[in-house]
Image (cartoon, rainbow, N blue to C red):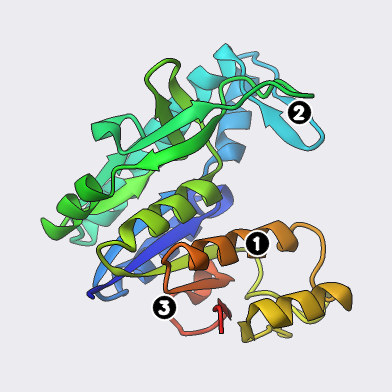
Amino acid sequence: MEPLTVIKVGGKIVEESESLNQLLNKFSTISGAKALVHGGGRSATRIATQLGIESKMVDGRSITDKDMLQVVTMVYGGLVNKNIVAGLQTLGINALGLTGADLSIIESDKRAVKEIDYGFVGDVKQVNDKMLANLIQLGITPVMAPLSYSKQHGLLNTNADTIAAETAKALSKHYETTLVYCFEKKGVLFDETDDNSVIPTITPTLFEQYKSEGIIQGGMIPKLENAFNALHHGVHKVIITQASELGNNSGTTVILA
């Protein structure tokens, strides 16, 4: 199987021109087929404030009402996405910006109301892997915004980590897929206060051990649980690294064995 790399980058990296240019230069050096999934939450919050739209949070999670849905559609599907596409074109990479609605690439269900009504938030139901694979085989690099699509509700705000994982899982039918999560640290750390204490490899056994020892805690637990879920659904390996280290064979590699 031909290799494919799906890279997810957080909003801060793609929202500032200097870090965006550095990321795109790194991304352009990765060999083989690739796709990029981006966030953009800080820009959405800033523009919503400028428009007089209040950002609503419950238990640390954002609520997407109709007004905020308009903002995230403009920011994720427009401003951030097209800046990335333009930057890749400048580097000679044929890129195509996509939301889940384009070509029905990612279909979702609107999240059911339980204790909290998250509003127009989508939980991914299916990814059109054949359409994505066809685009990639034509030499096109998909640049995917964190927006999915429901036939009943239209566009839905969707977690970028989830978009990346579901895309990587779907494309693993066609490619040997590596999923790379870029965030602010060099990888998963033995010691949160030492940025150079990167854990090179994590297996399920080591994950349970490090959790019990308190080495892995907080938000890193669901990130790694998502990584193992992707591996159990056909993804070859998952790498957690810093955007500036992209393509340097550094960071933490998550594998099943």
Q: Amino acid at mark 3?
A: Gly
Q: Is residue 27 left or right of residue 207?
A: left
Q: Residue placed at 37% from the left, 62% from the top?
A: 24
Residue 65, picture quadrant: top right
Q: Which residue is mark 1?
A: 225
Q: Mark 2, residues whose alpha carbon is within 10 Å: few (<14), some, or many (≥20)?
A: few
Q: Is residue 218 above or below residue 152?
A: below
Q: Nearer the viewer, mark 2 or mark 1?
A: 1
The residue nearer to you, when weighing 31 against 110, is 110
Q: Which residue is mark 2?
A: 57
Q: CB under 8 Å between callouts 2 and 1? A: no
Q: Is residue 56 left or right of residue 234?
A: right
Residue 21 in percent (x, y) is at 40, 59
Q: Is residue 17 visible?
A: no
* Residue closest to the far right: 213
Q: Residue placed at 65% from the left, 13% from the top?
A: 52
Q: Residue placed at 33% from the left, 48% from the top?
A: 143
Real-space CA distance between mark 2 and mark 1, rounded to the nearest whole angstrom: 24 Å
Q: Amino acid at mark 2?
A: Met
